[in-house]
């Protein structure tokens, strides 16, 4: 019996991977415009990093982590998200000493033991950004505007940016007490998970996806009505800057996030087209996190996008690898040897070239050229070879003319230029 992949962990095949590459290169380009540099961190960290940053009572730490003990007896975890690792690296390399503002982005696989379904997998991929060192609400607005710009550029259509403020350690405890009092009176209507959350992490009840819990908490008190002066001002300024930039958003007063480290600005980019998996990007401010992980008291803000969900939404946009510029069809052993060398030379000169590897008939080779959608085919047989020429065939109109193999690169480039000119004219 053949060995299969692991449930919830996907292969990304040619035909799909082009969409991924497009998303990645667009992210790299847009983030670079805003001054972000890439950082690459390992996919495995010490388990306590995630316990301490994400929080013991979150879904991720309670039930979703891939944790194992390595041969040295250390508990390690496949990273469930990127922020903790990036902050660990930021602190470990004292990046704040070199530059008081760090603007970083990352992309790569994340691992969570969840129930696999459309848009929810056990190995999934995130593209994320983190900005450390800036309190000013302009960075909040810039990051949201950058997220918006990315979504405009990938042309995903119907997405909505929702924002909220989760307050800070100064104002959240009082709000939390009010929420607890509110929830206590409705415990009977909450799901089992939420009854547990009620004692461990009551804010998370507002994030529950169960219909009963949503209904029971419809008029729950909102953090927004309980912000301290500083948080209130910060949120108002963030909104004002977003308005200045013309970045559309909606305030969602009940948005909380599944990780403990968030403070003040939190946000999600939502789509109506992915059922329950409606968040394509999510993030927020985490002003206490760097300190909590043993670093200096620096504020931070970031987000992560789920690449699988973006790719699903992009689905029917046809993005395939470009076809070869030229297919060389060769007949007979000597011509095949020459074709092989010509291909190599043209590739070194920057052209995409394909040949047939199986010594098949001319007809079969032409069929393959057609399948690969090569616009040009160079045909060489023993006679042509002896004269140092080949037949250059234009697949569009099946016209054919003899050309010298000497100077083949120039001839092919000239023909491609003509073709692209014709394509533009049409
Ligand atoms: P959800 O509420 O959908 O579980 P989350 O709050 O757990 O999302 P985050 O931890 O904020 O998600 O991660 C940011 C983004 O990563 C999400 O908005 C989503 O697009 C994506 N994501 C999260 N978990 C998964 C998963 N298991 N499979 C695929 N994508 C995911
Ligand atoms: Mg989740």
Image (cartoon, rainbow, N blue to C red):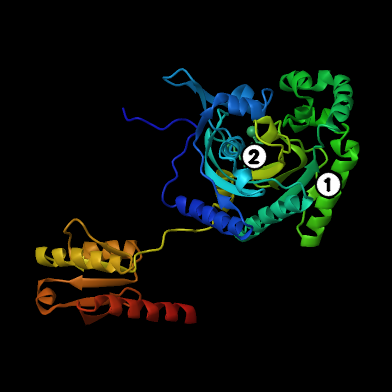
Question: Label 1: how many residues lie within 10 Å, few (<14), some (14-19) or many (20+)?
Answer: many
Q: Quadrant of residue 390?
A: bottom left
Residue 345 percent location from the top left of the image: 24, 67
At numbered mark 2, what does the secondary structure look like: helix, strand or loop?
A: loop
Q: Is residue 340 left or right of residue 40?
A: left
Up-down: is 357 above or below 229?
Answer: below
Residue pointed to by mark 2: 277
Q: How far apart are marks 1 and 2 (CA)?
A: 27 Å
Q: Is residue 72 left or right of residue 117?
A: left
Asked whether residue 426 is in view, the answer is: no
* Residue 407 visible, this orientation: yes
Circle on res. 235: 1
Say if 369 sits above or below 223 in the image: below
Ligand number 2: quarter of image: top right
Which of the pair 220/286 is nearer the observer? 286
The residue tagged with tag 1: helix, strand or loop? helix
* Label placed on residue 253: none
Question: Callout 2 environment at 10 Å: few (<14), some (14 to 19), or many (20+)?
Answer: some
Q: Which residue is drawn at the image coordinates 10% and 63% (left, top)? A: 333
Q: Are the residues at dot 1 and dot 2 in contact (C-beta closer than 8 Å)?
A: no
Query: Front-most of 131 and 363?
Result: 131
Identified at 24% across, 79% down, the residue is: 407
* x and y, in percent, of residue 294 in the image: 65, 30
Q: Is mark 2 within 8 Å of ligand 1?
A: yes
Spot occupied by residue 114 in the image (x, y as percentages of width and height):
57, 29
Mark 1 or mark 2: whose residue is earlier in sequence: 1
């Amino acid at each position: 019996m053949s060995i299969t992949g692991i449930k919830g962990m996907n292969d990304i095949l040619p035909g799909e991977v082009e969409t991924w590459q497009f998303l990645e290169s667009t992210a790299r380009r847009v983030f670079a415009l805003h001054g972000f540099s890439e950082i690459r961190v390992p996919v495995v960290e010490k388990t306590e990093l995630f316990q301490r940053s994400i929080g013991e009572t979150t879904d991720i730490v309670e039930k979703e982590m891939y944790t194992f003990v390595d041969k040295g007896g250390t508990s390690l975890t496949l990273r469930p998200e990127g922020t903790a690792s990036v902050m660990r690296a930021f602190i470990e390399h004292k990046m704040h000493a070199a530059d008081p503002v760090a603007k970083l982005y990352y992309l790569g696989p994340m691992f969570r033991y969840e129930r696999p379904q459309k848009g929810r997998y056990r190995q999934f991929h995130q593209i994320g950004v983190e900005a450390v060192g800036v309190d000013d609400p302009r960075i909040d607005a810039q990051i949201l505007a950058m997220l918006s710009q990315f979504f405009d550029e990938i042309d995903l259509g119907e997405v909505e940016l929702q924002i909220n403020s989760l307050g800070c350690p100064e104002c959240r405890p009082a709000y939390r007490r009010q929420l607890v009092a509110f929830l206590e009176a409705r415990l009977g209507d909450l799901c089992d998970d939420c009854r547990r959350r009620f004692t461990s992490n009551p804010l998370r009840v507002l994030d529950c996806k169960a219909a009963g819990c949503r209904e029971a908490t419809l008029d729950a008190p909102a953090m927004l009505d309980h912000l301290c002066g500083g948080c209130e001002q910060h949120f108002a300024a963030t909104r004002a800057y977003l308005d200045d930039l013309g970045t559309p958003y909606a305030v969602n007063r009940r948005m909380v996030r599944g990780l403990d480290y968030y403070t003040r600005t939190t946000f999600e980019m939502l789509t109506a087209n992915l059922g329950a998996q409606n968040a394509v990007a999510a993030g927020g401010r985490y002003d206490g996190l760097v300190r909590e992980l043993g670093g200096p008291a620096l504020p931070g803000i970031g987000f992560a996008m789920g690449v699988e969900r973006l790719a699903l939404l992009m689905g029917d946009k046809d993005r395939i690898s470009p076809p070869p510029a030229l297919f060389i069809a060769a007949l007979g052993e000597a011509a095949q040897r020459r074709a092989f060398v010509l291909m190599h030379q043209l590739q070194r000169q920057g052209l995409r070239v394909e040949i047939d590897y199986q010594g098949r008939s001319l007809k079969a080779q032409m069929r393959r050229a057609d399948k690969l959608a090569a616009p040009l085919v160079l045909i060489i047989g023993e006679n042509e070879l002896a004269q140092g020429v080949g037949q250059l065939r234009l697949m569009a109109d099946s016209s054919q003319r003899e050309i010298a193999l000497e100077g083949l690169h120039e001839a092919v480039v000239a023909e491609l230029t003509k073709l692209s000119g014709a394509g533009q004219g049409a």
